[in-house]
Amino acid sequence: MAETLPSVYGGEILHVHLGSGETEIEPVTPRDARRFLGGNGFVAKQVAEHVPVDAGPLDPENVLAMAVGPMNATPFQSTSRGVLGFISPMTGGFFDSTFGGTLPQALKTTGFDAVVLHGEAPEPSYVLVDETGATVKPAADLVGAETYETCAAVREREGVGYDTHVLATGPAGDNEVRYACLLHDSEMREGVAGRGGAGAVLGSKNVTALAVQGGDFQPEPAGDLRGRTVQQMGQLMADTEMLQEYGTAGLVNPINEMGKLGQRNMQREQARPEAAEAVSGERLREEYVTEDTTCANCAVKCGKHVTVEAEGITDAKIPEFESLFGTATMQEVYDVERVMKANDLCDRLGLDTISWGVTVSFARECVERGLLETESPHLDFGDADGLVDLARQTAHREGIGDDLAEGSFRLAARLDDEADRYLYGTKGLEFAAHSARGLKGMSIGYATATRGGSHHDTRPTLQYDGHHDETTDGTPEFAARIQHFTALGDSLTQCRFVSEAGWGARVNEAYAEALELATGWELSVDDVEQIGERVYNLERLINVARGVADREADTLPYRVQHEPIPEGPAEGMYCPPEELAGMLDEYYAFRGWNDNGHPTAETVDRLDIGDVADRLA
């Protein structure tokens, strides 16, 4: 008897050809559902199959694929997550970027498990998706508009208010800033596909927004998934108390106390306690938070709105921990109101706060060391007002902003070789806030990450609890298996915070039980983990084919390998070259990759991805 597709899937992938406006539908096969699950796995397969390996990230041949997972719109908690897949303007390799809000749940109800944008629209446009398909609509007047303005304008045109769910570029995307993000302004909370340059890819396609109107499809789990999720609620709510109270900004003080929070472009990793407190979640909560916000189907409410009367900010999105790292501690800027203004501008202009902030801090150190000559008065550490002006200049590619818009690696390439010593990232993408020197799991995790400087490949969460934070013993296997966990989670698709706190920070029996109740498949824990392993190896194969993944690329920046943390509780920690080399050997062996970091034919066969690998050859 032929296997059937579980009824939690809509069963269709919608392809939209922007040049002609034509659409076509591809069925989701039961085999692909089992192999790639959804979300991350689905978009990786679409990129592998449809983007030529020699196509540039901003070429029409690149795609922007958006997918949801089997758990979207089911009782499984916090699964209103969408995943975008594309070739990144930052790394030149595969990238997936996730976002929350209400749009992903709306997409699931259309019956489309994925939407893939191909080519380039002949005029500025937005794309509307509903259960009947997609329409490409003119939007010349929205070019240059801020993200929130575009979301509001599209909602008004469609005439059904927030029942039109919009994901928009801003001026940064229109101007193809390499790390431009996309923002979704929903009735419940904002969602941002922040990293890798999805906004630049959409902008290069002459598209200013992707909008979705929900349909009548309702997924039907095979078993009592609701009852199983109820069992996890107590643990979930107990272990997310910090997020409920402060959002991710609540991490500032504890991580600073560990001496693992970057300062002044990573010259140090601990701020004075009073400086950290000035930009902490505790202070934001006490003085500026006006309401808690949440994505669809989530009780945690980690989102917050802030109001800053002196800055003219009303109910803006609270800066996340990663954003406070990029725009406050890395800049030595502790004027929290100016920091919130800079972050609100980044959201409105469509800038990834991590890559932008780390690029600015890199430029500030290069000016400080006499490596970068500029007429800009805004490249001094501690300059809070300059930070606000630089956001505008970057999004519009004006003055020094045109250089900042390319990211720190491309800026370094046109400076003296010494500038490379002050980069903080790998594979062309700036690191997030979790220390590559102070957390050994992040050292090997960042070095081998598909996305480069992403903290959502190997996660820091368990390391902050003392697992593989200061030892290399078993750490390469730990990093690889957490990469399986994150690829699995982004394929389900579930919010990382809820999955780690409510269901476990490693693949375990709870995930296998939930997935079996959703799909009806009989799955062991090993079977479930192998889904994540398969997706991660597919991402690696894409990058190998594009020439951006090998042992030379699996590296760490000079400062991480040669300059120990100079002071504080983590003083002396770093990852010297010989330590990294040893961890890479162990990591490759565990993964079944050759000495150059390429998946072997045996690994490809074991993971049943030979058909996709052949498309990349």
Image: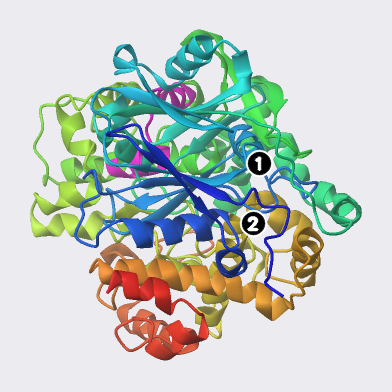
In this orientation, does residue 573 appear? Answer: no
State the residue position of label 2: 492
Residue drawn where x is 46% and y is 59% of the image: 435
Q: Position of residue 457 (x, y in %)?
A: 50, 62
Q: Secondary structure at mark 2?
A: helix
Q: For the C terminus, which image quadrant?
A: bottom left
In this orientation, does residue 396 appear? Answer: yes
Q: Which residues are magenta?
A: 340-359
Report if residue 411 lies within the magenta region: no
Q: Position of residue 314 (x, y in %)?
A: 57, 12
Q: Secondary structure at mark 1?
A: loop
Q: For the N terminus, which image quadrant?
A: bottom right
State the residue position of label 1: 80
Q: CA distance from mark 2 to mark 1?
A: 10 Å
In this rendering, the count of numbered labels is 2
Within 10 angstroms of label 2, few (less than 14), some, or many (20 or more) residues? many
Q: Amino acid at mark 2?
A: Leu
